[in-house]
Amino acid sequence: MSMDLLLRERQFLIRERLRTHGRVLAAELAREFNISEDTIRRDLREMAAAGLCERVYGGALPLAPDAGRSLTERASLASERKAALARTSVEYIERGMTVFLDAGSTNLAIARAIPPDLSVTIVTNTPLIASALIEKPTFDLILIGGTLDRAVGAAVGARAQRDAELLRPDLCILGACGADAEAGLTAVHFEDAEFKRLVASKSRSVLAAVTTDKLGTAAPYAVVGIEAVSTLVLEADAPPAHVAALTERGTAVVLASEPGG
Amino acid sequence: MSMDLLLRERQFLIRERLRTHGRVLAAELAREFNISEDTIRRDLREMAAAGLCERVYGGALPLAPDAGRSLTERASLASERKAALARTSVEYIERGMTVFLDAGSTNLAIARAIPPDLSVTIVTNTPLIASALIEKPTFDLILIGGTLDRAVGAAVGARAQRDAELLRPDLCILGACGADAEAGLTAVHFEDAEFKRLVASKSRSVLAAVTTDKLGTAAPYAVVGIEAVSTLVLEADAPPAHVAALTERGTAVVLASEPGG
DNA sequence: TAAATCCGTGCATAAACGTGCATTAATAGG
DNA sequence: CCTATTAATGCACGTTTATGCACGGATTTA
């Protein structure tokens, strides 16, 4: 790796690496870019000041404390709300379908909520979801492989995309980091967004289950417009204004039943 | 000074372990992270000061006593016998290696036992193993995809085999359903055996960790002859007759230390 | 109470750090 | 074209940080 990189390019690559690996070491980066550690340190300092990473002795870590580290943790968070979303979402899964189940804690809840006697083919790029589903005996399970992106907790890179090219799911259940009538579904990570978009484009229909806190927000990377989402499952307490705005775009919005009942 | 694991990462892992195990021991952590107990004590002191745990004599406890996780998690933890096998097996994993980690409960124990500060590339076809490893920050993780065989719990079909063709692991850690001097390593499922044989043939060396109950038995499908196994890790109570027979075939047989110590 | 652990402190060391300065390469102005 | 300016980088230097080791004190256990 003896290419001359512009400052911005280098910092972009560092950010990328921070995402996919969950950490960077100053010495390692210096070696890989063939530049002095001083420069790397300057980069990291700068990026930390810009709020792009957390500087630590020896390197840097991603800022978001929840970044991929434990999907399990996120899943157990607000689990009752997500379970309600999941209960409603799984009603759109019908016998004989091929369903792509995307990464994300809400989708993990959906995986757990799929009736175990349903005979379907589930495709996923997320090992944790695959592990959860492998218990259920009537499913055909297909795993999308490749390099695992720790921030996403799933395979979303080149290899995974090549595998996904061949899919024609009846239903694609997308995870989303943001959902907005204008911005559509959005994701925090570039390659994740890319992957989602690819799978969605191959699918006959698209469903997304979105918690209220993500409504009306937009993450950096666009996945698909709201028009491309056939069914949007929201929580019962979703603000009516948002629901109306989304419905106007032609998406079927469904409210999950109250967590309490 | 190795500096393999950044301070924050280590403390994060300690926190996670506190959450999942309900307690941590200083000596244990020092061994797992390959650092001195002094440093662990410093970590625990610091974390206690930050209100992240309660420091006690010998280790630390979570602040909220009910934060401990479900029983299923503890139940799924490897038995002490397998953990002993795993502790010995992971010593053959060296920094910088690319290691293929096959399916199987013993291999899951091995996955959990790999020191979190080891910088290696792990390839696996088993979502459960991938899920377990995704928490450890210094690993590159590659997932082999394809149709999941639920009896095996891993991807072993045509697709997985095509992926595996491209691998050249330094070390292949095979699971086995039977191990015998005559029959070699054997497996219960045809495609699983096929897949194992393929990966083993691509690997520079092959290790298998086998519990005593599998010794001297043969499952229906041959994987590889004992000659092809570089290192065979057995339990301390393995019958000497078997050990001798296996050693005669040229395999390096290693006995795991007693579960008690 | 005695032995065995575990603990904290102080100290040593090596790695990582930041700063100031020099060098080089782009950019702008004349 | 030539010069002034600025940004990016590397190097030298002194500083800080993380870690291990040694030792004496504290705590548990038999």
Image (spheres, coloured by chain):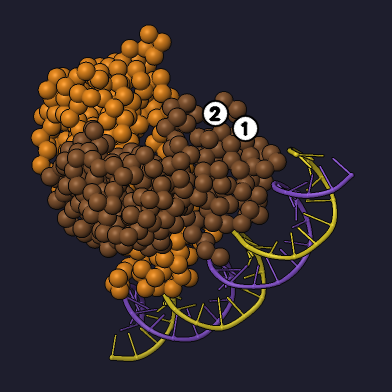
Chain colours: A orange, B brown, C purple, D yellow
The residue under label 1 is which amino acid type?
Leu
Q: Nearer the viewer, residue B12 or C18?
A: B12
Q: Is residue B100 above or below residue A43?
A: above
User: In the picture, residue A242 is in which quadrant?
Assistant: top left
Identify the residue position indicated by label 1 in the image: B63
Residue A45, position as x, y percentages in the image: 49, 60
On-image quarter of the N terminus of chain B = bottom right
Say few, some or many: other residues with alpha carbon within 10 Å of mark 2 (under 14 / 14 to 19 / 20 or more).
few
Residue at 23 percent of width and 33 percent of height: B150
Residue at 34 percent of width and 15 percent of height: A236
Residue A256, position as x, y percentages in the image: 31, 15
Left or right relative to B117: residue A138: left
Is residue A197 shown to the viewer in this render?
A: no
Left or right relative to B120: residue A136: left
The reply to whether dot 1 and dot 2 touch (C-beta < 8 Å) is yes
Label 1 chain ID: B
Dot 1: element: loop
Residue A13, position as x, y percentages in the image: 33, 59
User: In the picture, residue A172 is in which quadrant?
Assistant: top left
Residue B62, position as x, y percentages in the image: 60, 34
Identify the residue position indicated by label 2 in the image: B67
- Could you give the CA–CA distance between mark 1 and mark 2, rounded to whole angstroms? 8 Å
Q: Is residue B186 above or below residue A261?
A: below
Left or right relative to A22: residue A140: left
Dot 2: element: helix
Say few, some or many: other residues with alpha carbon within 10 Å of mark 1 (under 14 / 14 to 19 / 20 or more).
some
Residue at 17 percent of width and 47 percent of height: B194
Is residue B115 shown to the viewer in this render?
A: yes
